[in-house]
Image: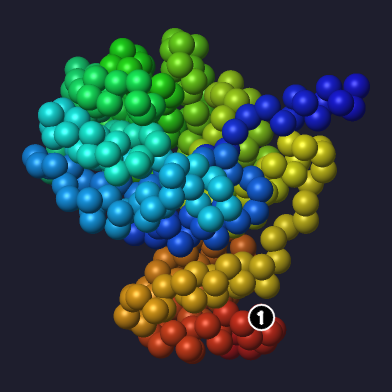
Amino acid sequence: MVDQLVNLLHEGRVGLAPMEGILDAHARALLTARPGFDWAVTEFVRVVDARLPPRVFHKHCPELAITPPTTPSGVPVQLQLLGSDPDALAANACQALRLGASGIDLNFGCPAKTVNRHDGGAALLRDPHRVEAAVAAVAGAVGDSLPVTAKIRLGFSDRRLALACALAAQRGGARHLVVHARTRDEGYRPPAHWEWIARIRRALSIPVIANGDIWTLEEYWKARTLSGCRDVMLGRGALADPWLAPRIRHWQLTGERLPITPWAARAEILTAYASLKRDTLPERVVVSLLKQWLNQMRGRDAEAARRFATLRRITTLGDFLEGLATTQDAAALTG
């Protein structure tokens, strides 16, 4: 009986979602250093109307230096493309194939206004035929050499075309589909509509992966239960708690819950991120990236919120790192 329970819990993979501006190769390396993630996806490579040079792909996916591309701990890394021109997407997918990519993910989920205004990301969800054309062009260009996958939201302004867009991605040749459980207009406002992902999963024959608002072990299981999906993808939740994926994996394997992630562990990963960045980026940029990551942590951890309140106006890296490491009590931090 115990063995059956452990096997049941272990079913299900966990992916690391792309997040523009922070979830870069260094962050991927740190977040995948402990067992928990089964694959990761890069920040999107923006495709307009031309084949991009190799340096652009290597900038977004330094893991291309390894065959096949993986993080230092061996977690596979998939390259993501964002664009609306099927021919340009196909040409760049072929370029990625030549450079050693092991998979292409197509972004139909980005809600950023600047991206949508330039006909990218979630903007294509207003017309399922365009989703199908983009996926089909890429899948046809790379053939059986690379798996092509896609990520969507539950529509642009509403959910009326959610199922149609999902079916379009499948018809185009997507091997799996990640669904962020909100529309573009809903942005990241709660709640995530995991039950809507279940409608899509039941209609598709390819694997469907649940994404959105998975911050805790309990929400992981709730997302799986309501969506019926075996696999999930973590984005902001992995930044908020860098031990969320290992926590899920430990529970899958043992049925046991790990204790909450202490502040010292959170500070350690932020400090390690700074160490990886400080030799190649200006100090002010490194501080800005650290603030972005700490900002994700503060909504789910009281100590991170106190540190953010204290450090939000700090501009020098040394002072910022000192503020992360200090053992001052909460009163001193806020006073």
Residue 216 visible: no
Residue at (50% x, 42% y) in the render: 76
Task: Residue at 16%, 47% (x, y): give it.
Answer: 52
- Decide: is 196 above or below 288: above
Q: Position of residue 206 (x, y in %)?
A: 45, 16
Element under disc 1? helix
Closer to us: 18 or 42: 42
Q: Residue furthest right?
A: 1
Q: Quadrant of the C terminus?
A: bottom right
Neighbor class of circle 1 (other Cα within 10 Å; few <14, some 14-19, many 20+) is: few
Mark yes or no: residue 65 visible. yes
Is residue 305 rendered to the left or right of residue 123?
right
* Camera-side residue of 332 and 270: 270
Q: Quadrant of the N terminus?
A: top right
- Quick check: 141 above or below 23? above
- Give the image's coloring scheme: rainbow
Q: In the image, residue 162 lies at what x, y percent? A: 34, 21
- Residues 180 and 334: in front is 180
Image quarter for residue 155?
A: top left
Q: Is residue 189 left or right of residue 243?
A: left
Q: Quadrant of residue 185?
A: top left
The residue identified by callout 1 is 330
Residue located at (77% from left, 51% from top): 258
Q: In the visual, does 140 lie left or right of 39?
A: left
Percent position (x, y) of residue 9?
A: 74, 30
Q: Tell me what residue is drawn at x 82 percent, y 39 percent.
A: 254
Query: Measured along the vertical axis of the image, is residue 285 above or below residue 23?
Result: below
Give the residue type at disc 1: Ala
Q: Which residue is nearer to you in this view: 151 or 314?
A: 151
Q: List x then y, in percent, for residue 319.
A: 49, 89
Q: Residue furthest left?
A: 49
Using the image, determine if residue 143 lies above or below residue 37: above
